[in-house]
Image (tube, rainbow, N blue to C red):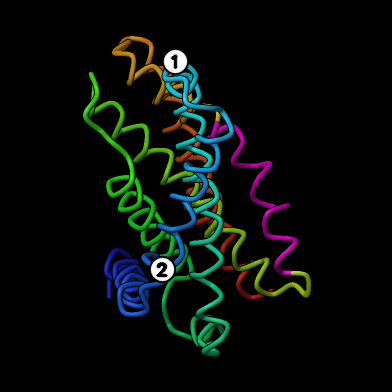
Amino acid sequence: MTFAHQATLIARKDLLIEVRGRHALGTLLPFAATVLIAFGFAFGPGRDVLERVAPGLLWMAVLFSAVMASRRAYQTESEDGALEGLLLAPIDKAAVFLGKAFAVTVELLALVIVLFDLSVANPFLLLAAFVLGAIGLAAVGSLFGVVAESARTREAIFPMLVLPLVAPILIAGVRATDLAAAGRSSEVLSWLGLLAAFDVVFLSVGVLVFGYLLED
């Protein structure tokens, strides 16, 4: 079985669990919608204000959803006792990491497509920003989700590990989204490049150290 096939099987398993359990539909969608509505009311009905803060609101909803989705990916394994099975299974542990990261990325992109309007001046650049940002958030969440699951204070430690590391992704994602929505294509590319660089770093670190984290 090839490395790519192993990662695909892990991602397929996680996505099937989400589809059958409807966790994303029942938890992530209402949560993200509530965040957007609550912040929308907080900033008032002014159109100009909402347009200025919209990119930040979108990414806050995606960030919190990424935290919840990453926690769910390992919580399900822990509840069923499958985490030890993954450790003992004759598969590359890096494939487990990439498979889980891919599944979380798909969930986040589905959330973006359902909730957010992509009909802007540069929909492809906007979608690229969300794709690259979702990959980075999923990589960090999938890497530290296994650490939090093995800790006693798992509910508290996971946000403490993830949120500081995803701050650069959040900043770059907000700027890329804002510029893409404004039609400033030439300025978006540098931020997309920064997001891509973060993705490469976090995915590479995850591939290298995930096996050790899983064993611990």
The structure residue drawn at horizontal position 73% and vertical position 52%, both measured from the top left corner, is 160
Which residue in the protein does label 2 denote? 26
Q: Which amino acid does label 1 sit on?
A: Asp
Q: Residue 2's x, y, as percent?
A: 28, 69
Stretch of the chain drawn in magenta: 154-170
Q: Residue 53's x, y, as percent?
A: 50, 24
Quadrant position of the C terminus in the picture: bottom right
Tell me how many marks there are.
Answer: 2
Q: Residue 64's x, y, as percent?
A: 55, 50
The structure residue drawn at horizontal position 66% and vertical position 66%, both measured from the top left corner, is 147
- Label 2 sits on a secondary structure element that is helix
Q: Which amino acid does label 2 sit on?
A: Gly
Residue in the foreground of this view, choosing between 76 and 142:
76
Which residue in the protein does label 1 denote? 48
Q: Is residue 60 left or right of residue 103?
A: right
Q: Are marks 1 and 2 in contact (CB under 8 Å)?
A: no
**Disc 1 or disc 2, which is closer to the eye?**
1
The structure residue drawn at horizontal position 24% and vertical position 24%, both measured from the top left corner, is 120
